[in-house]
Image: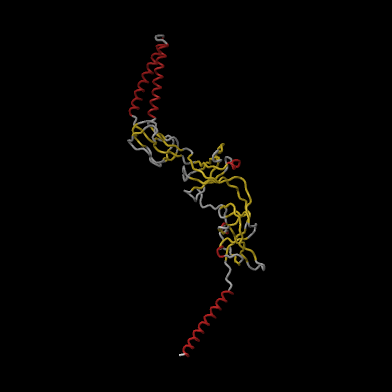
Amino acid sequence: MMLMLLGCLVLFGGIFAYKFIVHRMVNQYLDTMTLPAPTVTSAKAQVQNWREDLSGVGTVRAVNGVEVTTEAQGVVSAIHFKSGQYVHKNDLLLEIFAEPEKAQLQVLDAELRLARRNYARIKTLTERGVTTEADLDTARSTLDQVVANIEVQRARVDQRRVLAPFNGVLGIRRIDLGQNVSPGDAVVTLQQLDPIFVDFSLPEQKYALVKEGMPISLTTDAFPKNTYSGKITAVDPRVDMASRNFLIQATLENPKKHLRPGMFAQVSVQIEAHRRVLVVPRTALLFAPYGVSVFVLEKDATNSSVIANKRFVKTGEERGDLVEIVQGLLQGDEVASSGLLKLRNGERAVINNENKPPENPSPTLGNS
């Protein structure tokens, strides 16, 4: 019995010793094993000349935009348009029943013919000395009154015809055939879409920088991939006392009718001033609650390896793929631009720029 117990102890002791030795050897191997350095792409901090832009928000507005209304009371007898239709100036949109007014106009035409004959007859008699000048004046006055009454009646007939005041696109029809309408009732909206305005504001500190004729660019939430170009056509001479902003109006060509009145727009005014900025790709930045940092890639003491050193920086304006560095880097400093999550401060790195993406301060996805 004692021999069996002793044998078991020896067996288990040997197994334990074997596992202990193997575990210790594995740990020693892992401690001494050198991991391959992570591969990253790099970019150098470079100085660029950036044109100063003034940014603001605004609203797209039609050059001409109205709500077409009726001028007379009556029943709608004909509708000559469809919702969303393009119309030209003086196109007939709507007719209101006008038979009594037209009949009255015919009566006045008959009175006009009679008044003209009477005037011609009395004029002949006056020239012969048969009648007096007073009779001629009365006939002339009667003729003038009939002519004036005809003009008034024609205006009443015309008021029962609704015409397009300018070229443009109609909105949704708000009136029906046979409907009894009153003066001022809305028929449809009409908007002139090409060219088109954008009204936007800038703070008063920028007033001296803005002039008529300056180019602007515009983007909208409705068409985020498109950039539209135009020029400033008016600057309000007054600064708003409440907001301390001043109003600017720009005009843009709109052949595709993408821009519609009421749209929210982001506007950038391209002024002539430039400034020199130090920039790096946005992908080179590490954002954290305690600050923004980059990994600066530098040669080690033997000049044989690249070491990634973490450095905090202060950033400025962003444009496209690039970010301005206000503090923390010098021109020519090489920073990691991808693979940042694989890096550790003070450890080696391998640079491979074969598949490096381009860097553009103003990338364009599409144009109108």
Q: Is 165 left, or right, of 360 in this rendering?
A: left
Q: Position of residue 317 (x, y in %)?
A: 58, 51
Q: Quadrant of residue 293?
A: bottom right
| Depth check, front residue: 24 or 78 | 24
- The quadrant the N terminus occupies is bottom left
Q: How is the image coloured?
A: secondary structure
Q: Position of residue 321 (x, y in %)?
A: 56, 55
| Outermost top residue | 129
| Depth check, front residue: 213 or 67 | 67
- Vertical position of residue 27 compared to residue 9: above or below: above
| Depth check, front residue: 216 or 206 | 206
Residue at x 55% of width, y 57% of height: 289
Q: Is 241 left, or right, of 145 in this rendering?
A: right
Q: Quadrant of residue 347?
A: bottom right
Q: Position of residue 335 (x, y in %)?
A: 61, 60
- Looking at the image, how many numbered discs can be counted on the residues? 0
- Vertical position of residue 300 compared to residue 80: above or below: below
- Vertical position of residue 230 compared to residue 351: above or below: above
- Vertical position of residue 311 compared to residue 368: above or below: below
Q: Position of residue 41 (x, y in %)?
A: 58, 62
Residue at x 48% of width, y 49% of height: 221
Residue at x 49% of width, y 84% of height: 12
Q: Quadrant of residue 109?
A: top left
